[in-house]
Amino acid sequence: MVENNFDKVQGFVNNGDCQENFQKGKEWSFDLKVGDEYFVSGDTLPSKLTDSNPFIIIKPGQFAILETKETVSLNREYMALISVKFSFKKKGLINVSGFHVDPLYKGKIIFTVFNAGPNEIYIKRDEYVFMIFFMKLTKPLPKECDIRQGYQGIPKEMFANLGGGSLTLMEYNKKIEQIEFYIKFIIVPVAISIFVFLIGSFFKSIIH
């Protein structure tokens, strides 16, 4: 059952705008903002949003690793489900990482997302991008279970495999179009010219 009693769940989202987050989530979930640190496939290291650099740009076919601005602190009685907000899903932004938060988790939530849409996706600093809602367990975890210290930033192991000079789907398409151009307008005409020349030479040798 989804827990939508604000008095019971307000302590799970650690942020000064907790009430606003809850109201934006239509009072049964919490909307969460994108944090300052992010990573986009093709880069070598994470970057940070600033006043002079307030946008994340995710190209079609690119992966990105995003963090929430808020931290989440769950007790032994609750777990949570997480998602990308529909306003970004309809642009093609897909969550390809986990879809739940374990009981006793304390930290930021890290999302790995993929732009499956045809256009670049712009995410502004402090924009509401994610949502979370809480579900009460039928039986709390035993007391011997330890608090799970979560993320306070994007760990190296998450972005290491997405780094380097990877190409987006759009860039792959451009490469293919370039190859098709060379084949149609350079390689094929040259091959035909050589073939015609060889045929002509062959017939000349027969005649003579």
Image (cartoon, rainbow, N blue to C red):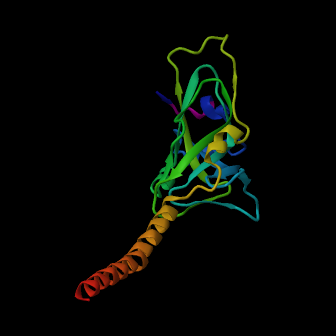
Front position in the image: 69 or 30: 69
User: Image point 55% across, 43% down: which residue?
Assistant: 131
Residue reaching furthest to the front: 208
Residue 21 versus residue 120 in the image, above or below: above
- Vertical placement of residue 45 versus 198, above or below: above
Q: Quarter of the image holding residue 12?
A: top right
Residue farthest to the left? 207
Residue 22: percent from left, percent from top: 59, 42
Of residues 170 and 7, the one drawn nearer to the viewer in this rendering = 170
Query: Magenta residues, as a range?
Result: 3-7
Quadrant of res 156 = top right
Residue 132 location, x and y as percent?
56, 39
Residue drawn where x is 47% and y is 58% of the image: 91
Query: Does any portion of residue 66 appear in the rendered image?
Result: yes
Q: On the rendered structure, is 97 left or right of 45?
A: left
* Magenta-drawn stretch contains 151: no
Does the rendering let one see residue 20? no
Drawn side of residue 194 relative to residue 118, left or right: left
Q: Nearer the viewer, residue 102 or 202?
A: 202
Q: Is residue 6 magenta?
A: yes
Q: Position of residue 193 (x, y in %)?
A: 36, 82
